[in-house]
Image (tube, rainbow, N blue to C red):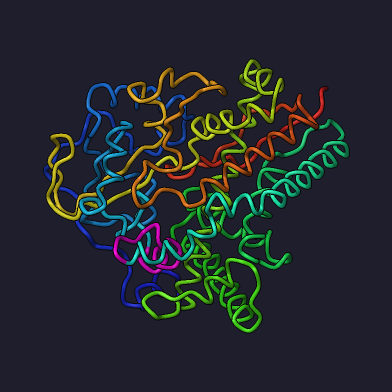
């Protein structure tokens, strides 16, 4: 049976929610084209700047990289300014997450198996979020700070070892360092067995790469099959681990989820599996992309590297905030209108999709002073890379900050002259993915 038929056989398939009026005119600037998302962030910013200045909320055709086009999907509202994005995130009664948070159309089974609380609305969202929030408080992050620092040392050891063994001193940053740090830190918290860590990271990279033919395959059926295989592996691993933790509790997040109750009921294996998938994606991908783009910024902005080198521990906090703004690891999030409503004078119809463009909002000069300059000393820094506030603000933001701080302090201490070449980016409008990026830790 084909993957597509298997989804249909389960009796659900795609969300068939209409989005928009077929007679509503599209804006003359089309930011849904595949070619637009194949360019660099700097190139896209020239277009976003026009939209922010002249018409910040525009009606756009469906994204061209949609995996599964839906007949009654006529487009979405593009929200490009900082203030409008923040407003949308703080109006959860008007703008829902439940129908999905990516601009693409994916099978319902995949959404339910992968998005968990990030694609839920109150009251269930509130109850389930509380279960995992205790694992990501600043107090808990400080508790595992020594482990994060040890992992930073470990992955830099690996990077330097591989560079010394390389004939020309160049190694791939992503595979030899950037992927490893969040992988170890997140899996330490979750309690994923050592032998499964690289596999979980790889499978979720594959799952989130449906727009990249090199990773997921060329045809829709190949992509769906690849994604389903990755999800199946993650849920099976979660179920095995939870079963073991119920018999033998440990000091990890899997145990907390296995023992947790909502309204007197235990979480199901499927709910825990969905949590695991979401947290693996969020815990690995966002940090990995911020690390890569942050490292590249040291090469392209030597003045900022020099400033950070003078006092890494004293200056790393503001540097990290600026790296995260500069990277904007998640470029878009979607909401769906719960009712007919208004957004700054624009009439939104029930069922309309809205896509918030974080990569545009982080360059909005009405909210951020000199947004096109990289400034590691920037303070305050009102970037929205961890969300615009509201109920879906990133739970793991402190974990990401701790990891970035630890690694860049370690790099400045041990290989302050590290350079990185132009990265190879993965196509797509969701994650700002660096697939490969050659780096040289030591001077030539």
Q: Is residue 251 above or below residue 389?
A: below
Q: Is residue 21 visible?
A: no
Q: Position of residue 327 (x, y in %)?
A: 52, 34
Instruction: Give the residue drawn at x 72%, y 49%.
Output: 146
Q: Position of residue 289 (x, y in %)?
A: 57, 41
Identify the image quadrant of the N terminus.
Answer: bottom left
Q: Is residue 426 left or right of residue 315?
A: left
Q: Position of residue 232 (x, y in %)?
A: 53, 71
Q: Is residue 174 left or right of residue 63?
A: right
Instruction: Give the residue drawn at x 31%, y 77%.
Output: 11
Q: Position of residue 207 (x, y in %)?
A: 52, 58
In magenta stretch: residue 110: yes
Q: Choose top left, top right, bottom left or bottom right for residue 344.
A: top left
Q: Choose top left, top right, bottom left or bottom right for residue 247.
A: bottom right
Identify the image quadrant of the C terminus.
Answer: top right
Q: Is residue 3 above or below residue 80?
A: below
Q: Is residue 232 above or below residue 403?
A: below
Instruction: Give the residue drawn at x 55%, y 38%.
Output: 425
In magenta stretch: residue 223: no
Q: Is residue 132 visible?
A: yes
Q: Is residue 349 left or right of residue 39?
A: left
Q: Nearer the viewer, residue 149 or 10?
A: 149
Q: Nearer the viewer, residue 400 or 134?
A: 134
The overriding secondary structure of the stretch rendered in magenta is helix
- In this view, the residue farthest toward the bottom is 247
Q: Is residue 343 above or below residue 42?
A: below
- The magenta stretch is 107-123
Q: Nearer the viewer, residue 236 or 267?
A: 267
């Amino acid at each position: 049976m084909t993957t597509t038929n298997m989804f249909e056989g389960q009796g659900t398939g795609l969300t068939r929610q209409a989005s928009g009026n077929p007679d509503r005119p599209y804006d003359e600037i089309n930011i849904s084209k595949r070619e637009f998302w194949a360019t660099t962030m700097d190139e896209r910013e020239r277009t976003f700047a026009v939209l922010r200045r002249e018409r910040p909320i525009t009606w756009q055709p469906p994204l061209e990289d949609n995996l599964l086009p839906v007949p009654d999907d006529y487009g979405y509202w593009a929200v490009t300014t900082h203030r409008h994005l923040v407003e949308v995130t703080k109006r959860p009664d008007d703008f829902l997450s439940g129908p999905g948070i990516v601009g693409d159309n994916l099978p319902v089974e995949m959404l339910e198996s992968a998005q968990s609380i990030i694609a839920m609305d109150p009251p269930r969202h509130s109850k389930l979020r509380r279960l995992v929030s205790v694992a990501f408080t600043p107090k808990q992050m400080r508790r595992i700070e020594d482990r994060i620092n040890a992992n930073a040392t470990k992955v830099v050891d690996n990077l330097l070892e591989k560079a010394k063994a390389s004939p020309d001193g160049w190694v791939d940053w992503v595979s030899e360092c950037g992927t490893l740090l969040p992988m170890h830190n997140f899996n330490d918290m979750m309690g994923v067995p050592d032998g499964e860590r690289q596999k979980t990271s790889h499978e979720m990279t594959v799952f989130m790469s449906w727009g990249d033919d090199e990773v997921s395959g060329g045809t829709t059926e190949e992509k769906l099959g690849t994604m389903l295989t990755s999800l199946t592996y993650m849920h099976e691993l979660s179920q095995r681990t939870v079963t073991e933790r119920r018999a033998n509790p440990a000091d990890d997040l899997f145990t907390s989820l296995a023992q947790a109750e909502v309204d007197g009921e235990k979480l199901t294996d499927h709910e825990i599996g969905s949590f695991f998938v979401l947290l693996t994606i969020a815990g690995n991908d966002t940090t990995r992309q911020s690390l890569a783009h942050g490292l590249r910024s040291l090469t392209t902005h030597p003045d900022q590297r020099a400033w950070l080198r003078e006092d890494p521990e004293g200056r790393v906090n503001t540097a990290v905030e600026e790296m995260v703004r500069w990277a904007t690891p998640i470029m878009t999030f979607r909401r769906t209108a719960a009712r007919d409503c208004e957004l700054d004078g624009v009439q939104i119809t029930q069922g309309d999709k809205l896509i918030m463009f974080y990569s545009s909002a982080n360059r909005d000069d009405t909210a951020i002073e000199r947004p096109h300059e990289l400034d590691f000393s920037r303070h305050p820094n009102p970037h929205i890379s961890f969300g615009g506030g509201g109920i879906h603000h990133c739970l793991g933001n402190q974990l990401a900050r701790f990891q970035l701080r630890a690694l860049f302090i370690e790099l400045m201490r041990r290989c302050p002259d590290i350079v990185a070449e132009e990265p190879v980016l993965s196509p797509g409008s969701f994650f700002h993915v660096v697939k490969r990026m050659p780096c040289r830790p030591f001077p030539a």
